[in-house]
Amino acid sequence: MSEVEGRLEETLRALVAFDTTSRLPNGKLIEWIEPRLTALGFRCERQHYPDDAGVEKVNLLAFTHGAGEVPELALVGHTDCVPYDSGWAEALKLTRKDDRLYGRGACDTKAFVACALLAAERTRGVVKKPLGLIFTADEEVGCLGAKMLLEARRGAARNAIVGEPTSLRPIRANKGYCLAEIEVSGKEGHSAYPDTGASAIFRAARLLSRIEAYARGPLRGETDPSFEPPYTTLNVGLIQGGRAKNVIPGSCSFTLEWRPIPAQPVEAVPYAIEQLMFQLRREEPGCEVRMRILRTDRGVETPGSAEVVTFLEAQSGQGSATVSFGTEAPQMTALGARSVVFGPGNIQVAHQTGEYVPVAELVRCEEILEAAIRHFCG
């Protein structure tokens, strides 16, 4: 085992040991990271905020230069993880089996955080231009930490490498992520006498049929061939309604999720759905249907000619690509950075019991981040 590999494994083991499931505070992990960066000469800042449940969360920003200087490069990683099965006894204990390191967050995305920390350490004394390291909270529940940075206009950089498990393939674009809740009303009554009420579930079903036709037809008319699938997708993942089996349901609600391609406004889907809702109201007098927008994260695309893209392509030996899942790249882009998503591990093994990162990818990622620091900030 090389020195770099050993130090990466040691760092990752410490990071995995912190239970940073998104519902919990992440402060203890930040308290472990910050002194390590301060010792390297970084100027550290914390951004505190309470989540919707009142739990305190922390974003950590670390910079090599003064407050007025925009970093040439920022390495961005989220500190939170998805929940783990209680049956996974070693979820918080990094375990090595052959050439893989297992543990919650080992892939998504504490491996990238470990690489960023070691790369910063190994380039101490080399950095001449501003470098930033940014570690966020609550990425897994809506990129909330990154949104807090954007709201406060903190964390700007000229180039950003955003950590996610991409199998070391540079990702220059990702779709957006949007969410809404639709509530359809009816009139309760005894199920033995259907004409005394109006079924909210039947009304919702008629609306859903039209939404499905829209998703399979007009919504696919605008495409971006760099994505798979190449169009905005729409999904209804949750539905609930009714009070009892023998009561005509008076209400029904469902969630609507859509992932817009970068060129499409996030408002396009709700505008089209509003037209379908209007049709339902017109055809069924007395029908009430309301839509509440919960989230509208835009997609993002960095030009393939951008220096950070071509640099990572050359270093990784892989052409850049796109993904359909959301990342923190849109927020970094909105702060002024040319952003690329990049990191060790495969997204297909994230978010599940037995999550792991290949040791070879972990080591190679650190080498590439180290080279990026030297290239952009040396």
Image (cartoon, grey):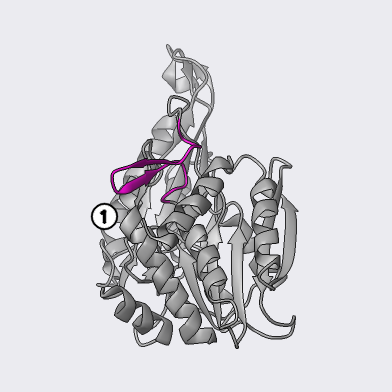
Residue 344 place in picture, x, y as percent: 37, 59
Q: Nearer the viewer, residue 98 or 246?
A: 98
Residue drawn where x is 59% and y is 69% of the image: 133
98 relative position to 307: left or right? left
Q: Is residue 95 above or below residue 265?
A: above
Label 1: element kind:
helix
Q: Nearer the viewer, residue 198 or 133?
A: 133
Indicate yes or no whether the magenta region holds residue 105: yes
Magenta extent = 90-107
Residue 228 place in picture, x, y as percent: 26, 62
117 relative position to 351: left or right? right
Q: Of helix, strand and loop, which mostly describes the magenta segment?
A: loop
The residue identified by callout 1 is 216
Q: Nearer the viewer, residue 192 or 167?
A: 167
131 relative position to 245: left or right? right
Q: Is residue 150 above or below residue 138?
A: below
Q: Quadrant of residue 121?
A: bottom right
Indicate yes or no whether the magenta region holds residue 92: yes
Is residue 164 visible from the viewing direction of this image?
no
